[in-house]
Image (cartoon, rainbow, N blue to C red):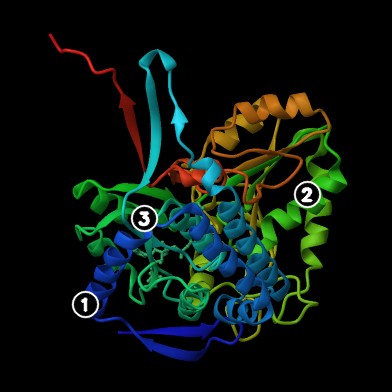
Amino acid sequence: MSIQTINPSTNKTEKSFEEMTEKAVDAAVAQAAKAFDHWKKTSYAERATLLHKVASLMREKKSALAKIITMEMGKLIAQAEGEITLSADIIDYYATNGAKFLADKSLNPEHGQAFIRYSPIGVLLGVEPWNFPFYQVARFAAPNIMIGNTVLVKHASIVPQCGILLEDLFRDAGAPHGLYTNLLMSGKRASTLVSDERIKGVSLTGSEAAGASIAAAAGKYLKKSVLELGGSDAFIILEDADIDQAVEWAVVGRMNNNGECCVAAKRFIAVEPIADEFLRKFKDKLSKLVVGDPMDPATQLGPLSSEEAAVQLEDQVSRSVKGGAKVLLGGKRVDRAGAFMQPTILTDLKPGIAAYHEELFGPVASFYRVKDEQAAIVLANDSPFGLGGSVFTKDIERGKRVADQIDTGMVFINHPTWTQADLPFGGTKRSGYGRELSELGIDEFVNKKLIRVSELTDPF
Ligand code: NAP
């Protein structure tokens, strides 16, 4: 089967690639295992030097890399450049701090000399999504290469050139053959590959279906797994919020990355006293967004990542409307070539309606009006997902109290859910398990080995 770059702004096929054969994948796994035997013996300083070099090449090539991202998955060009900078920051962060995070940890001195030593576990498989094609890979690859593991990356099939370019960056930075390998193949083959005894762990970022498939294989073959799955973040606006600021952030929170973020604000929950004002201002801003070519710096909303994604989102909207939802704004495809969807607001959502339960991956906001803070918390938690969320209030202590009651992996006060190298990222419930980024992100695929030194004594 061939894997293709299809530009979602035009729906035209730009380039085709042949999938790797089974034999080629087998050789790649063997090379990754061989590279591990060498890489696990290198010093942290050596690993850090390589990672800094990768980050610096990324920054050097930012403009060219960003253009490929935009061409393959439709992200606005300025955001694609921002993604390259963020990815380089993450790689530098682990290069700079990895040795400190992985230093021996002393235990209770009553045991004499006892400590935890952090050791690599081997070859890892990373299955990655298209929506942040460089950032997602940086989150997985950088900490693991710093630990001393080697990585195989199965990137999303709609961003084959991003996958190849990432491998090129590592090779050009001087990575030994097999340290970082791009596997050009379909998703289903990734689940099968988990059974390979040379692979010691697997991390997937993507949909629930793909996550369940990988987790089932990891369970069957007793391998460690990390899952970063979908989300339907609540964005709560309390009556004491700065409404104008909340509206500005609501637009960013929903429309960043053309609405295709796992941690996008997807469910806007406003308490009664300010619900009308928020909704009027939010609708006004969304209706003025400039939709168009993501390469044009004046564009504010580009296409979805593929025609398939646009068809799926339109279907979710139409099923929601059949179930009783109202369309306050948009609701249709944009009348032009490409995978474009209008900025949309759905209201009157109730349990049983598609948009109430499903993740809407695109520029469609769900709006809810509730009586008070407590009702907002109950609604926010009435979701199968548990990724992020946000609360807008001028009373920070109140914001923290609300945050404490929201059942997700991340809650932001007066800001949509966001990401940075030194902030942990991950979810609860059907949003997955494990953490990436920060010190926690280097802690997943590592053997925390206890070493204890005992006095030489007679056992009897
Ligand atoms: P997807 O279809 O699950 O694809 C993600 C990756 O999984 C791709 O590489 C895909 O390969 C692979 N895959 C598909 N089916 C598989 C299977 N049965 N076994 C193993 N691998 C399989 O997800 P997507 O549409 O690209 O990404 C959107 C989803 O990712 C959303 O739900 C979003 O919220 C979530 N996401 C979560 C996070 C987070 O950190 N929590 C971050 C970003 C995105 P192919 O492309 O070859 O099918």
Q: Nearer the viewer, residue 72 or 356?
A: 72
- Residue at label 1? 22
Q: Position of residue 173 (x, y in %)?
A: 52, 73
Which secondary structure lies at badge 3?
Answer: loop
Q: Position of residue 348 (x, y in %)?
A: 63, 47
Task: Using the numbered discs, state the Cα–Cα distance from disc 1 to disc 3 in whole angstroms.
Answer: 30 Å
Q: Amino acid at mark 2?
A: Leu
Residue placed at 80% from the left, 50% from the top? 247
Q: Amino acid at mark 1?
A: Glu
Ligand 1's image quarter is bottom left
- Crowd band around label 2 with a 10 angstrom C-alpha radius: few (<14), some (14–19), many (20+): many
- Whether disc 1's CB lies below 8 Å from ligand 1 is answered no
- Residue at label 3? 41
Q: Position of residue 401 (x, y in %)?
A: 68, 24
Looking at this rendering, what residue extends furthest in the left direction?
A: 460
Q: Nearer the viewer, residue 394 or 196?
A: 196
Q: Nearer the viewer, residue 410 or 343?
A: 410
Q: Amino acid at mark 3?
A: Lys
Mark 3 / mark 2, whichever is N-terminal: 3
Q: Nearer the viewer, mark 1 or mark 3?
A: 3
Using the rendered image of the protein, determine whether residue 372 is visible from the camera's viewpoint: no
- Residue at label 2? 279
- Crowd band around label 3 with a 10 angstrom C-alpha radius: few (<14), some (14–19), many (20+): few
Residue 232 relative to residue 343: left or right: left
Residue 261 relative to residue 249: left or right: left
Q: From the image, which quarter does the C terminus lie in? A: top left
Q: From the image, which quarter does the N terminus lie in? A: bottom left
